[in-house]
Amino acid sequence: MLKAENQVPRSRYVIFNLAAFFFMAVLAGRFFYLQIMNYDTYRKRADSNRIRAVSLDAPRGLILDRNGEILVDNYPTYVLYCIPGEMENREKQFGVIGENIRMEKSMLESNYKKYYRTRFLPAKLAKDLSFDDLSRIEENKLNLPGVFYKQHPERIYNQKVRASHIVGYMKDLDNNAEEVKDKQSDYKAGDLIGWVGLEKQYESTLRGEKGATFYQVDAFGREVGHVAERDEVAPTPGENLETTIDISMQKTLERELEGLRAIGIVSIPETGEIIACASMPDYMPELFRGSMSGRDWSHIVSDTNKPLLNRFANGLYPPGSTFKMLTTVALLNNRKINPSEKIECTGFYEYGDRVFRCWNEDGHGFVNLEQAIEQSCNVYFYQTVQRISLKDLWTVWDRFGFGKKTGYDFPTEAKGTIPDRDFMNKRYGRRGWAKGNLLNMAVGQGEILVTPVQMAMYINHLATEGRAGKLHFVKGKGGVSDSSPHYSSPIWNRIRDHMEKVVYGLRGTGKSANPKIEGLNIAGKTGTSENPHGEPHAWFIGFGEKDGKQVSLVLLVENSGHGGEVAAPKARRIFSEYFNRSEIKMAEAQK
Amino acid sequence: MTLSRKISETPQTLLFIPLFLSALGLWTLYSISLDQGTALAQNLFFKQSVILIPALVGFGLAFLVSRNLIHKYIYVFYCLTLAVLAVPFLGEKIAGTHRWIDLGLPIGVQPSEFAKIIIVIALARYLSDRNLQMQYFGSLIFPTIIVLVPTLIVLNQPDLGTAIILMTPLIPMLFWVGARPFHLFLFIAPILSILTAFHLVSFFIWAGVMAVIFYFSRPRLLYGIGLYFGNLFLGLLTPVAWNLLRPFQQKRILTLLDPDLDPLGAGYQIIQSKMAIGSGGFFGKGWGQGTQTHLKFLPVQESDFIVSVMGEELGFIAIVIMLSVFTYFIFRMSRSAFESNDRFSGLVLIGFASIFLAHVFVNCAMTVGLIPVKGLPLPFISYGGSFLMAAFMMVGVSMNLSVNRTG
């Protein structure tokens, strides 16, 4: 039956071939589009598909004291991670882990949520594991698929001192942190960042640069070895931070202030190097390193002594009598007093319908400027300050750097308050205040609030005739201070002379600050500042000089009474330690 | 006719090209199996090499069998095929479909692959048996039924890809025996009416184009109007029918429109396939060096997506060579069809050429994201037993029928 002739017109044959060619051409065109025109796009996408960069942490720089002794070091700790996609039963495994490392299961759960990134990237579960913990985890390894630990450097602190408010602490970034969300930064969830203190201020120096190693991952996100065509980038370790802190002075200072609410700053006036600095009470620097339990946290937060408050940077205090030198500068500079002029102190002074009291209720009798400073007579200043204006006082305060930041190398600093006309008008109304307010300000009370760091700047200027260096914690970060009060040498010399009387004079309020070291001259001023929180704050500011070497000191003990009684004896021991020690050191150096 | 004469007169390229493509396929499979177990039973390269033996035996038989026998018994085979197609429905589902028959062999058999051969030959016999008045539309109805019955069975398995392939030879074969283009247009029109129905503007443009074609083709007024509005009505019914589709079929179609919508679900295969092909560039990453392939980003890489492996490892150059070879293969078959001196042989050749063309187009278009994922193998290259065997048998029949009878 195969009889039917084939009678296909050539046109239909051609059309069939054209149709076939058309379909093939469409395919070829599409392949051309993908493989030639979009090659780069797909190549990149394919690589990002399969290459996973795993960052290598850089060892953080150490923090050293001025002699190279280590203040903050690194030591290896063990951190527990899990790969979510490789765990079989999270609930159950967390239970097993919790039992073996004695950690609450809920804590593991919350860490898991905090550090979860993707199914096949490790999430941090716990840190600071002990060797016992590790060995127990190791024993249970078969029950814990997808769980592993990694060595991780952590901060360890010099046991001689705490210095916690200076060095500060680090913080774990979780996946809600700004730094993690910021795509520009290379911080990842689980990374540590300097959060407070010098750790924060010098984060970029200390941190170093992360390295990276490149793993090839398969379609399930599992690592299947290194990528041959990309080399590992080694991390750049962070730089060490050489501070100006002297560990033994820091230790002395901390010991003096132990158990008090107090501040001490020891510095070198000319350069501004801070040798020791303490804000008490403080906290163990280790506190923020491990996994702090909720109870520890609420305990430290609810402490009425506020150990977390950095008092030298953020504390605001009335300066009290320590400000009398500034009133003196204003009076002398405006030539409104004759230093030998005697003014009678009867223990109080009536101005209008108000009574202003001297601390000595019996009165100081007739006192000149020298005696007024030596004995810290208030009445002398109540009377003389009436010869100048608020503007005159404000100018002096401002030149010494009050009311603004000193710009030292620390992440936090308060400005404090020095009142001017506008300030007073705003607070009391144009007619709400009068010259009477000046009387309080003349003795460092009233609206004035200062930070201990500003006080250190102030005493350093007094020691150097206004040429103190900028305060700083890290070597090389000093330089010219932001404030530079210019006054004539006779004014500086007179004030220094009177401040020496405070320590050496028969009736000096700061006599107990004298360590009685041969060749050592100490100039100082006590302060007893009234405040709304109870007993007055005890101040001592001063500087010692021996063989051309100067050191200054600011001490404040909150709500403890008279500066001369509370703060000055502590100052004596600190000066004594400093100058005796340098004596010993010099002797050693000569040998 | 002596065997030696048959061999010398047949276009031997029709065998050499499939052998070349099979070698290309084996080479690619060898690359894929590099990171599979060393056990021979699991090695794709080895398994495919073994399957080639029965495939070549099938080719030999198909080449040697007398054309008269084929012609004489094709209707019997056709009826048997319908029955066999229904057999998988009696057994358990394999991989979620009734596509496979378990013969106790290490590999399952897919009767629908062999149905492709039978349907084409049966259709060729019907169209060559009588002096059909092809200019009448009525003459197209019975041939359509011949194709439609097995297609509907396969569609029910469900195997949309194969069903489409079974349908494709119909129009080229009708065209080959002289059907009016307008009538063939009427076959395609409902499909386009359905496709455009999802997009209002396209649907209006289509309605306009259709009106113009109807006007110039001058059908009888009543038929014309009826067919025209019938098509529009079909388009309007489509959204209703859409809801009757199986969810996986709906999803496949939707994912085509925007694979990025669902990068880890249905769109994953297309995205990974495009990435593999695109990242291959002109010369490819080198044999055995395809990262997307060997890191298992690429799904079903040994069968449906084998082109992606070639594109990634061997590059655009290899793809162009492969497409050119296929094009030449199809041209050579249509030339045999044109030069054949009996209508039956010519029709069979054109039908097979259409099936090969459809396979290549649908498979490649799927891997490059032009059409939805269909699950069709690439002839001679993809891993898979039944289709490889059926393809070589088609080659055998084609070469058999390419030899003209004497006298």
Image (cartoon, helix red, strand yellow):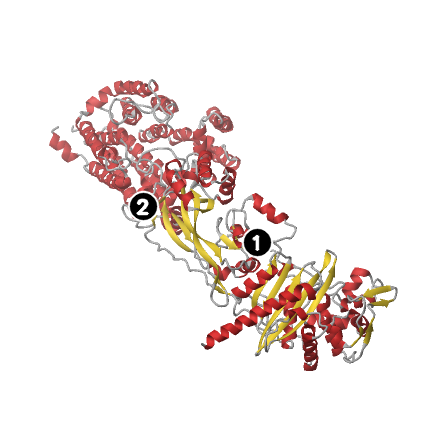
The amino acid type found where label 2 is placed reads Gly
- Residue A105 spot, x, y in % from top left: 50, 38
Q: Residues within 10 Å of mark 1 (few under 14, many from 20)?
A: some
- Residue B364 spot, x, y in % from top left: 34, 39
Where A369 falls versus B269 (above or below)? Answer: below
State the SS at label 2: loop
- From the viewer's side, name the closer residue of B241 and A230: A230
- Residue A431 spot, x, y in % from top left: 85, 63
Q: Is residue B370 visible?
A: no
Which residue corresponds to the image point at 55% horizontal and 62% vertical from the top-left? A251
Q: Is residue A141 visible?
A: yes
Cα distance between the residues tagged 1 and 2: 58 Å
Can you tell which quarter of the image residue A321 is in? bottom right
- From the viewer's side, name the closer residue of A357 and A147: A357
**Is B63 situated left or right of B334 in this image?**
left
Quadrant housing the N terminus of chain A: top left
- Which residue, given by chain and number where applicable, does mark 2 sit on? B290
**Is A539 situated left or right of A426 in this image?**
left
Which residue corresponds to the image point at 53% horizontal and 74% vertical from the top-left? A583
- From the viewer's side, name the closer residue of B278 and B166: B278
Marks 1 and 2: which is nearer the front?
1
Quadrant housing the C terminus of chain A: bottom left
- Residue A285 spot, x, y in % from top left: 53, 54
The amino acid type found where label 1 is placed reads Tyr
Give the number of marks: 2
Subunit under mark 1: A
- Please tell me if label 1 and label 2 are on a single chain: no
**Is A91 situated left or right of A391 in this image?**
left
- Which residue, given by chain and number where applicable, does mark 1 sit on? A283
State the SS at label 1: loop
